[in-house]
């Protein structure tokens, strides 16, 4: 492992996808005349899936999942599963109201699905375990992007008992839903940050231990965490910024089990959105706990002096049972370098006071309150059975779901197909309305949310989004009619 | 093998009592959900009172709160101060000096409070905790018919109750007695809100400490063994 660690250290300085120009240790590119210049931008976003349709309002793309051999670490190659030959997969970019057709081809040696995490679509297009796609099969996913759902989402496999394995092998990608009237889009540059982690053997292969090995049991309990942290498949990339400038960051936690506690020591962050898009107003935060499958939208303002170098970090977060808490759980880990140019600051950018209207769901209309009890590997004291319906509900109704975590480990809860609004966390009212599809339920705490079931009936999954817990059956089936 | 530095008071005495009771009780009872039909009230009361007797006589309150007095404050509601924690292992010697790692376990709230006690667990889960040592929060609510991991609904990776909970002895109680204890805890007690911090311990959740070699067979070997003699 020494050799690998040495390579990783080297990579942390250089980053492997640096454009072909001279870069010094501080990440500054040098102009031929020797004058200091804008720091190199080494964070590359995945490409946007090309739209094959010329029809306005239609997005038609091709997505293939297949084995590939890529260099995800310096100096070695790794056998991965990849969407369109890359990790992370290309980004699906659409607009509200678009008709989306995805021609999917499963070239994997095993059954898969593509789950469009957070999107409101017909149940049979959701890529849940009810609709597996066998090796070699093709399937067209067809759905329409609902109005008012502009935001940051993602896609990943969701086959029965194999989601953790397939995501660990490299299958995940971003979805950006844009609104015609986005208050920020025109003036503010955007960065996409897909957070993932992985664990490798010294030969570069992905370390997926036998479930009965000591490490396998820890992975089963905690969910599988890796010691190599990636942003868009890159290690410790650099984003340049100029004083006074503002950037919009869309951040996705695509890790199977790692929960990020994000901070940018040296400056506060403005959170402007969550899973389902923008808030009504920006909220100043010092740090953000981003559980598995959650997303945030941030405004990063260049408030530090010219030439500063700040580091986006993930701070220690204790989500573990005491028995399997990793020995280095309390280590702060660096994710990304935010490097200020030496240029004098630009004039401050004016931000709109109101971002968009977020309608508040009316709890007085709730026709049912469901109690969902989470224990280790189980929901309501049972493991999932695809032949069993756990909750029966009706379209056109509003419900309150009370998610109680009875055990000493966090469980991030995800409901398919329908966004919700958190009412309170352990009795503390949520300070402002926002659209969520995943919410962390910390150890021994209770989270209540309100959800409106409109549009699409059928069978929907709800589950713990620690992928190893999901695969163990910490999941249930909701049937709406 | 870890070493308990402290034992639940009265453990040795209770073990004697268990075998005496076991000899008097009949065949395996069905483990099922509670019945709520009218006319069962008297039977339910008898069951709950039997559970109360077993809990007092087995000194549950010595660790879980209230000693032997159901009228005491904090009766079975779990620990409320660090002095009531159990240090397990050799706390005096640091690991570097050859001492075993030391960790703390904490008797839980056994009252039927929904979030801090046993309220969200079924009587069958409590039965499975007492018979097999399986933690109710990490064991499905199903009838278990084997003690081999992965078979007969016994979890492939069992998560055991923290020491010094003496379930290896108390599992020898007949089904009906364990069900009576579960009935008392769920139906004969008022809920008390008291959050007890989780126990610490080894990553295998004490699985290596609870093998047949360590805790003996269940059911116990036929009488008389080599140490015993049939009465004349």
Image: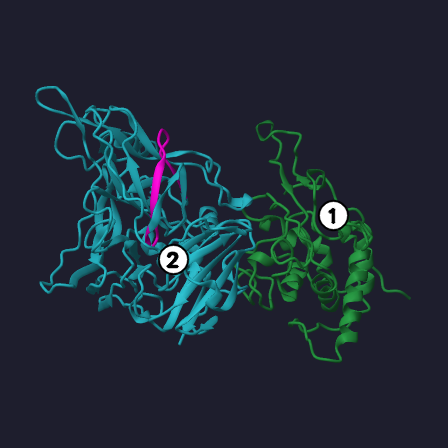
Chain colours: A cyan, B green
Question: Is the residue A33 above or below the residue B219 in the image?
Answer: above
Q: Residue at x 55, y 66 (%)?
A: B153
Q: Which residue is mark 2?
A: A437
Q: Residue at x 62, y 36 (%)?
A: B102
Relative placement, left or right, of A66 versus B39 is left
The secondary structure type at the circle numbered 2 is: loop
Q: CA distance from mark 2 to mark 1?
A: 42 Å
Rendered location of residue A72, percent (x, y): 25, 42
What type of secondary structure mainly makes up the magenta span?
strand
Question: Is the residue B129 above or below the residue A30 in the image?
Answer: below
Q: Residue at x 40, y 73 (%)?
A: A480
- Which numbered tag is attached to residue A253? none
- Pick whichever, A396 or A141, lies toward us: A396
Residue A386 in view? no
The secondary structure type at the circle numbered 1 is: helix
Query: Does the CB distance between marks 2 and 1 fall below 8 Å?
Result: no
- Pick whichever, A341 or B14, lies toward us: A341
Q: Which residue is mark 1?
A: B63
Question: Is the residue A428 above or below the residue A302 in the image?
Answer: below
**Residue A122 highlighted magenta (yes or no):** no
Rendered location of residue A293, percent (x, y): 36, 52
Which region is colored magenta? A260-278
Rendered location of residue A15, percent (x, y): 23, 34
């Amino acid at each position: 492992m020494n050799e690998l660690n040495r390579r990783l250290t080297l990579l942390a300085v250089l980053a492997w996808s640096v454009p072909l120009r001279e870069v010094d240790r501080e990440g500054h590119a040098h102009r031929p005349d020797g004058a200091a210049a804008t720091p190199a931008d080494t964070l590359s976003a995945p490409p946007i899936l090309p739209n094959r349709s010329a029809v306005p309002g239609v997005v038609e793309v091709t997505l293939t999942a297949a084995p590939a051999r890529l260099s995800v670490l310096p100096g070695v190659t790794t056998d991965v599963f990849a969407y369109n030959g890359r990790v992370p997969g290309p980004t699906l970019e659409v607009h509200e109201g678009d008709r989306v057709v995805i021609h999917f081809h499963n070239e994997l040696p095993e059954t898969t699905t593509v789950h469009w995490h957070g999107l409101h679509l017909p149940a049979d297009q959701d890529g849940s375990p009810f609709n597996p796609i066998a090796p070699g099969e093709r399937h067209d996913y067809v759905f329409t992007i609902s109005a008012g759902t502009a935001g940051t989402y993602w896609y990943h496999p969701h086959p029965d008992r194999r989601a953790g394995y397939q995501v660990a092998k490299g299958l995940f990608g971003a979805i950006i839903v844009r609104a015609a009237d986005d208050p920020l889009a025109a003036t503010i540059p955007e960065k996409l940050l897909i957070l993932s982690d992985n664990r490798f053997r010294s030969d570069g292969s992905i370390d997926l231990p036998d479930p009965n090995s000591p490490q396998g049991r820890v992975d089963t309990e905690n969910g599988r965490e890796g010691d190599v942290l990636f942003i868009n498949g890159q290690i410790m990339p650099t984003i340049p910024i100029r004083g006074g400038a503002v950037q919009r960051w869309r951040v996705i936690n695509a890790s199977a089990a790692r929960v990020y506690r994000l901070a940018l020591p040296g400056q506060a962050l403005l959170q402007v959105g969550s899973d389902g898009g923008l808030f009504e107003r920006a909220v100043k935060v010092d740090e953000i706990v981003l559980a598995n499958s959650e997303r945030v939208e941030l405004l990063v303002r260049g408030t530090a002096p010219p030439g500063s170098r700040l580091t986006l970090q993930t701070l220690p977060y204790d989500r573990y049972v005491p028995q399997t808490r990793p020995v280095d759980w309390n280590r702060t880990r660096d994710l990304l370098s935010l490097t200020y140019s030496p240029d004098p600051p630009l004039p401050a950018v004016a931000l709109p006071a109101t971002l968009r209207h977020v309608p508040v769901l009316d709890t007085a209309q709730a026709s049912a309150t469901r109690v969902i009890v989470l224990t280790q590997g189980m929901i309501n004291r049972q493991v999932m059975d695809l032949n069993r319906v756990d909750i029966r509900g009706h379209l056109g109704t509003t419900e309150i779901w009370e998610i109680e975590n009875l055990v000493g480990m966090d469980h991030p809860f995800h409901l398919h197909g329908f966004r919700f609004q958190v009412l309170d966390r352990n009795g503390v009212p949520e300070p402002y309305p926002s659209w969520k599809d995943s919410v962390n339920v910390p150890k021994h705490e209770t989270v209540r949310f309100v959800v409106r079931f409109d549009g699409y009936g059928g069978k929907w999954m709800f589950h713990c989004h620690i992928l190893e817990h999901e695969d163990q059956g910490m999941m249930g089936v909701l049937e709406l009619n | 093998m870890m070493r308990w530095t402290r034992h639940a008071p009265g453990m040795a005495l209770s073990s004697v009592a268990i075998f005496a009771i076991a000899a008097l009780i009949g065949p395996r009872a069905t483990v099922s959900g509670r019945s709520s039909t009218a006319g069962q009230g008297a039977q339910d009361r008898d069951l709950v009172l039997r559970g109360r007797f077993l809990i007092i006589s087995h000194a549950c309150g010595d660790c879980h709160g209230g000693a032997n007095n159901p009228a005491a404050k904090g009766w079975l509601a779990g620990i409320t101060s660090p002095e009531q924690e159990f240090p397990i292992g050799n706390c005096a010697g640091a690991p570097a000096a050859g001492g075993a790692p030391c960790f703390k376990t904490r008797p839980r709230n056994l009252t039927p409070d929904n979030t801090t006690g046993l309220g969200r667990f079924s009587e069958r889960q409590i039965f499975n905790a007492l018979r097999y040592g399986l933690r109710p929060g990490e064991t499905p609510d199903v009838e278990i018919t084997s003690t081999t991991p992965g078979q007969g609904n016994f979890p492939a990776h069992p998560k055991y109750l923290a020491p010094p909970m003496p379930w290896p002895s108390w599992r020898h109680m007949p089904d009906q007695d364990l069900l009576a204890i579960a009935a008392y805890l769920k139906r004969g007690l008022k809920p008390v809100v008291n959050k007890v911090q989780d126990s610490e311990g080894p990553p295998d959740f004490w699985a290596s400490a609870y093998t047949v070699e360590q805790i003996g067979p269940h059911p116990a070997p036929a009488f008389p063994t080599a140490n015993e003699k049939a009465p004349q």
